Amino acid sequence: MDFVSIRIITADVARLVGFYERATGVRAGWASEDFAEIRTASATLAIGSTRTAPFITPGSARAADNHSVIVEFRVDDVDGVHQSLAGHVEDFVQEPTTMPWGNRSLLLRDPDGNLVNFFTPVTPAAVARFAR
């Protein structure tokens, strides 16, 4: 089994895709105006319109209603990501901070309020955990 993607349902696909393109530096692939994907080397962030939710199961997915999942991206320079997003993010939850488990982490909310973590492993143990 391979874990391949997370999908976010949103009322404004273009706005959310624009945010994630800016945040990741990755251009989205669009299947339709209601569905796009940000593909990285290790996983895909899919972004679907609320118009696609009824195809799954009506009422099973609601836009801008996540309070338990964190979307995470490993980056080379979390402080650089913070600088590049300053002025484009309304809610920085946590400025870059080195966490007890060895990652330097930036937490923010995307335009739909989803919690997003950009992190860089900085201690030898954290770097070793993410070695490819």
Image (cartoon, rainbow, N blue to C red):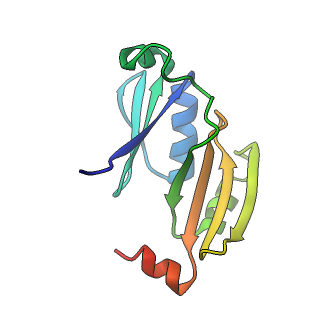
Q: Is residue 96 above or below residue 26?
A: below
At 51% from the left and 78% from the top, the residue drawn is 126
At 36% from the left and 16% from the top, the residue drawn is 55
Q: Is residue 16 above or below residue 126?
A: above
Q: Is residue 63 above or below residue 125?
A: above
x and y percentages locating residue 66 in the rendered image: 61, 35
Q: In the current view of this chain or complex, which residue is farthest to the left? A: 1
Q: Judge left or right: residue 127 versus residue 99.
A: left
Q: Judge left or right: residue 50 versus residue 31.
A: right
At 56% from the left and 23% from the top, the residue drawn is 62
Q: Is residue 18 above or below residue 43?
A: above
Residue 117 occupies quadrant? bottom right
Give the quadrant of the C terminus. bottom left
At 67% from the left and 36% from the top, the residue drawn is 113
Q: In the current view of this chain or complex, which residue is farthest to the bottom? A: 124
Residues 50 and 20: in front is 50
Residues 12 and 51: in front is 51
Residue 31 occupies quadrant? top left
x and y percentages locating residue 109 in the rendered image: 67, 44
Residue 53 occupies quadrant? top left
Residues 81 and 68: in front is 68
x and y percentages locating residue 73 in the rendered image: 51, 57
x and y percentages locating residue 69 in the rendered image: 56, 44
How many discs appear? 0
